[in-house]
Amino acid sequence: MKEIKLIAFDLDGVLTDGCGSWQEVHKALGTCDAAEEHAKEYLAGKITFDEWARKDTELWYGVDIERIREILYKIDLMSGIEFTIPRLRRDYKLVIISGGLQILADRIKNMFGMDYAIANELLTENGRVSGIQQIVDFKGKGKILQEIAEISDIDLEECAAIGDYLNDIPMFKVAGFRIAFNPKDERVVKFADEIIYEKDLTRILPYFK
């Protein structure tokens, strides 16, 4: 394996500790039941991922974007992040690639001086939610990692990926080194080089020296 130069992180469940940025907003706004129906439609193949995201976002139309920001900013950080990310930043390019919401991804990126944060952007009109710019779909993380690696003049074999769910598998397939961090589905484990079953981000440090 080549020397790692870039580490790509999933956001929800890896850098933050909670049920995910979409789910946290649904919980706070009381839209969980409708969102669950949309998820069932997607998993049954009745709608595309983009349609799923659009239908979910429609549940929030007219909500003040600052209310969304307030909800997202209350999400707990993953234990150990305050030590781990500054330590890794000394030697590696650090990237967030998330199917979650850009507001939260940007917050973590800016807090810790990470290099890139790619997620899905809520659109607004007069300061209120009016739509979604879907950038990271369910199968898109691998392509995004490839694009960032190319821009950074880094070989994919020099990239590590850290994730926990099925949508991280495309990223795992192209990265040179993969860590499943508290995986939510055992299918993720099949594509991982290492597995961590503990909510402590410092546990990844021994793999990056």
Image (cartoon, helix red, strand yellow):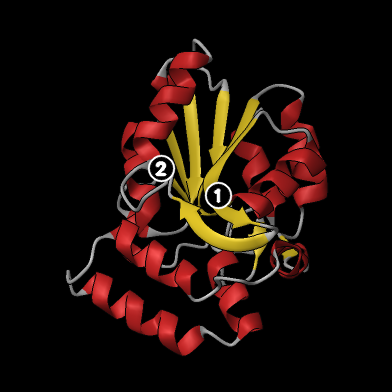
Q: Which quarter of the rendering shows the N terminus?
A: top left
Give the structural element (helix, strand or loop) at label 2: loop
Q: Is residue 44 left or right of residue 162?
A: left
> How dense is the environment of label 2, judged by Cα within 10 Å: few (below 14), some, or many (20 and up)?
few
Which residue: 35% across, 42% down?
140
Q: Nearer the viewer, residue 171 or 140?
A: 140
Tag 1, which secondary structure?
strand
Q: Residue furthest front?
A: 126
Q: Nearer the viewer, mark 1 or mark 2?
A: 1
Kind of residue at disc 1: Glu
Tell me residue 132's x, y (percent): 48, 55
Dividing the picture into quarters, in which one does residue 114 lie?
top right
Front position in the image: 161 or 151: 151
Q: Compared with residue 178, is residue 59 higher up or lower down, i.e. above or below?
A: below
Residue 147 place in picture, x, y as percent: 42, 24
Query: Residue 153 location in percent, x, y?
Result: 49, 10
Residue corresponding to mark 1:
121
Q: Residue 91: x percent and y percent?
A: 71, 21
**Crowd tier of the residue under label 1, counting other residues whose Cα lies within 10 Å: few below 14, some 14–19, many 20 or above:** some
Q: Tell me the kind of residue under disc 2.
A: Asp
Residue 31's label in the rendered image is none
Q: Quadrant of residue 87?
A: top right
Residue at image position (74%, 48%) is 107
Query: Residue 186, relative to residue 134: is it above or below?
Result: below
Q: CA distance from mark 1 to mark 2?
A: 31 Å
Give the residue pinned by disc 2: 193
